[in-house]
Amino acid sequence: MMFLAFAMCAALSGGEADYYAVDYLTPPDGEVLEVGGLAFLDANTLLVSTRRGRVWWVDNALAEDPSQARFHIFAEGLHEGLGLNVHGGQIYVTQRGEVSRLIDLDGDHVCDRIETVSLDWGMSGNYHEFAFGLPIDAQGNFYVSTNLGFWSPEWWHGVSKTEHRGWILRIAPNGEATPWAMGTRSPAGLGFDSEQRLLYSDNQGDWMPACGIFHVQEGEFYGHPGSLRWTEHYGFGEEAPSSIEPPETERTGPAVWMPYEWSKSTGNFVPDETGGAFGPFEKQLFVAELTEGTVLRAMLEEVNGKLQGAVIPFVGEVGSVLRVEFAPDGTLFCGMTNRGWGGLAPASGVARVRWTGKTPTEFQSVHLQQDGFKVRFSAPLTSVPTLQQVKVYDYDYNWWWDYGSPKTNQKDLVVSALEMDADGLGMTVRLEDLQAGKCVRVKVEGVGLLHDEFDYTIHRLPEGPAVDVQVAKRVVPPDQREAGDGGWLTLSWQDPFGTFAGDGWKLVDAALDPKDKSRFLTTPGMGALVNGEGAYQDFTSRLEFGDIEFRFSFMLPEGGDSGLYLMDRYELQLTDDADSCCGVVGVKGPRIKAYKGAGQWHVVEGTFYAPRFDDSGQKTANARFEEVTVDGVTVLGYADCPEPTGGAVSMDEVPFGPLRFQGTISRVALGDIRVKPLRNGRLPEGDWTDLIEKGYVGGSFELYTRLTLSDAGASRIEFDGGEPGDEGFQLIFNHTAPGQLRTGSLKPGTGLSTQHCFPGVAFDLRLVREYAAGKARVRVWLNGVLVNDTSYSNASQVGSLLWIPEAVPGTEVNVEHMVVRGL
Amino acid sequence: MKYQSACPWTTAVAVLACFWALAACGDQTSQESESETNLVEAEPLYQAHCALCHGKDGDGQGALVLDRPARSFLKGAFSFGNTEEALFRTISNGIGGTPMPGFKSTLSDEQRRALAAYVIALGPEQVQVRPGESEYQVTDRPLVVRGGLPPIADGLAPVNRGLLVGGLDGLTFEYNTKPLALLGVRQGEFVDRKDWQGRGGASLQPLGVVSHLIDGGFGTCNWEAETGSGGWIPQPAALVATTVLEGRAWVEYDLIPGHSGEALRVKETGLAISLGGWPGFQRIFHVIGGLGFERLRLAELADHKVELVAKGPAGRLLRRLSEGEEPTFYFKHGLGMEGDDQVMIVDTLFGLAPTDENLKALKELVQ
């Protein structure tokens, strides 16, 4: 029987403070130390560069009593100072626009001379064009990382407007700058690990699904396309890469992605080379985390030629740590600042983290195995973990222009075995289905670990191909923001009666009858959809929707009373009464009287979420309205509907349903009805065949396309049945060209007479053909909404698909993708 | 609240109608107080628009489960900056790809500004620059400050890499750093470091009044070099160092020839002077080694821009050719050696009209 050294003994772990004590230097009176760089000049002299362009000389920084530290200004008037280093006895600083050497000519510990080493990178003046640094290698080369700019109006796209923004530059001792590696976004930390490998940290945002620490090697690309502008492919500045479409350039994944819950703004990192003075984590990286105000620990290893590894929380509640640096005595100094970014208090100053000499029980090391992890503990556990105490899941990310990425494809991994080391200080966790291209979260509960979970980034497994499988997956880019009409479907254009049914409704012009304002006067025209006087009927869509943004116009006569039933069940009240108009019946009234009165047109916009159900059909979330506005004024922030409102078609709740305008009480005029489905029918991941390049032959298949069609243009896809009698079908793309059949129509089959899509705006179309026993069913979705469902007999088992881009002359069509796969 | 048919849900409607009436009462009260005070109250806006995701207390623990959890305002952390302006922008536009929506079309400017201030106030105290704290005055030692600069004159571009040299005598020499060139000279207070505020990258605010622009302040090349064929071309300069020593600040730079050839190292300093009672400033240039000044000239003193008025043992008096532009007179003197360095001194005099009387007095100075 194995003897395990569990410390029954080890009793309960204390908090972090039992093992690592944090104290704070007392800054000079009134001085706000917005720390951008830390470096030790000698055993007892700390230098602190700040965003205010100062370098502070700190004597006595290691004194037991932190208030004994003595600050004086060494250098002044710099253009920020987000990097600092001492090399060969010389002090170097990274300013926003240059790397400089700071020289004290007369020995009074005040800088007299600032020498320019290099200022060879572009600056456009954008606020976000920070420059970070400043590691120096054995040959005296400096490394600087440059931030992208963020410009209005599309300020969410990082842009490399001037040369070599979004790059890491190598600057030779003679000042010559070489663009070294690219693809950075907000590369706040740059430094060497204990093996003298150059690493940099980046910050979550566009093209950075999470913060990460990357291994910097010449010529590599880390993911943000902005920087590629300064490469040959883009004519060295001639052409800007797309800020939406992922580039084809081969990408190098980070050594470790930092989970969002642990790191939102990663600063720099330093290896523990203290020889044990800082505890049992020799050679590991300690990582600054600004937002959460913590220090994290990264354990990296080379696996199959790739530097990768795990990250784990280390010490919390420090403050907005941007910089970490080890003092000669093994104390970890933390420099804080959060101006403009935000982070845990304190927002400035210098903290010290000191090992108390007591060893915490931690994951001391983590090594990837082909089927799991081999971990060692820094101190005995309180008990042997059981399989149930080990919880593991994996996930990946989207690599896209949107800000950050959720964890995607998260799934639990089965722990197949736990094998304890003979000394009880380590174990191997064996997992089923461990894959490359995943982050893996391992948690071991209830065995006395101070921090009981780590997150490991796997780009490569120990055995297998020595190529990265990206954790951040290339995905179809989300819609460009502010794309105006993108994602919307119009429901009342050209022929509203193709979409809505309601006896007596007409397309006319309508106005209040001046003699009797409770009545409408209608005249021939196309300005309004109006229910028939005295023959009231509801106006109900044939299409069904789930989560949508909606928009429509309405006008009421005096005393008018109507409503919009979302999903035929949840009524947004439309009444000639500002106290109730656009409230949700029985749930919430409008918070502001935005309704202006009878005879006036109002535009209503809002978002509606359908109720949610679990697999057993049990409701898990109520239907709700959000941000309902009348003429731009918010009347409802949020209205939760525990059940269908009065007048619902049924009290049963369902995931999809039609729109119904109430037309049974009084007259009402409607106009420009639109919806934007929130589950928008974008191309899912999978193995797809490009229809245009490769063609397709099959019988049961699914087709996705995203395209933009010019005004008055028309295209089609033909399915040619291979058997006599089956004439196949045509799928029509025609928003505004002459003809009766609008986009989404099938010919022969069901034609659509309503124009749902805008010319010049991309839309998503999905088509599914299912064949069985001589019958075929063909369905078409536009932006995720089922618009056509046609079945026919005498169908061919197999046929071929053909794309006809120019069905009428002069058509311009831009196909983002048109792909197909068999079902 | 009218429905045509009597249905099983009629009772439910009646009950709900009571709730409705109560809710309406509550709303009515708040509306009245709002209209009475006519103020944008942020708290109700916050609860209505933000709390669902960010939590009613701002702790990021809202009722909605999001794929990327909302940020905690208590920690004061924001994806696109935590200044009021940055928050206003984020609240207006949302953050693409995240559940954070934009409120531009649903909330007024005032409401969004009120919300920005409200969520900032929920967070930890932010570093503030105290009034006057970021103003630098030159006291016992010249100061050199690097940073972005606003345009020195109307119609010019801002300078992304700038350099201000503040002397003990109240003059500020304002440079573009890349390429290195003096743009102008100011008199008065030194600088307000506006870049200490906001998210970074703001321009410095020089406080002195511009008393002289070099070549209109366009400032890319202060120097011209003679070509082999006798013409003159602009000669770019690259910053080498700034030095403050013995009460004087020096700017050091290399003039790098367009063709292959040795760079020429120049260092210059400036100071206030009074010449015959007229105020001005002096630029002292040292050429360290190299070819010397024979084939270089200051662009401002090119032949087509000035004329020689008088020449004497003390130097040369030059007058600007284009009338009505300041300054009118330059005094070029001090050509000679200082150690291994060649030295040239140019005085620029302010506010001196080209009258016969003035000319006579200046000529005497030259003699």
Image (cartoon, coloured by chain):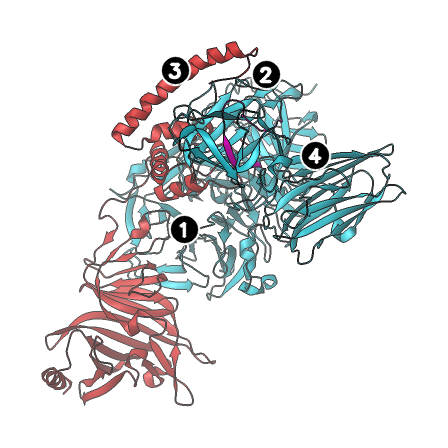
User: Dot 2, crowdedness within 10 Å: few (<14), some or many (≥20)?
Assistant: some
Residue A283, image x, y percentages: 54, 42
User: Dot 3, crowdedness within 10 Å: few (<14), some or many (≥20)?
Assistant: some
Residue contact at pointers 2 and 1, CB within 8 angstroms? no
In the rendered image, what is the letter of the chain coloured cyan? A
**Residue linked to disc 4:** A434
Q: Nearest the camera: A695 or B2?
A: B2
Callout in the foreground (2, 1): 2
Disc 4 to disc 2, C-alpha distance = 46 Å
Amino acid type assigned to the residue bearing label 1 in the image: Leu
Mark 1 secondary-structure assignment: loop
Disc 3 to disc 1, C-alpha distance = 58 Å
Amino acid type assigned to the residue bearing label 4 in the image: Leu
Q: Nearest the camera: A60 or B309?
A: B309
Residue A201, image x, y percentages: 51, 46
| Chain letter of the residue carrying label 2 | A
Residue range (magenta):
A656-676
Q: Nearest the camera: A164 or B82?
A: B82
Q: Are marks 2 and 1 on the same chain?
A: yes
Q: Are marks 1 and 4 on the same chain?
A: yes
The colour with which the image depicts chain B is red
Point out which mark residue B340 bears. none
Point out which mark residue A651 bears. 2
Mark 2 secondary-structure assignment: loop
Q: Are marks 3 and 1 on the same chain?
A: no
In the drawing, does residue A65 fall left or right of residue A711?
left
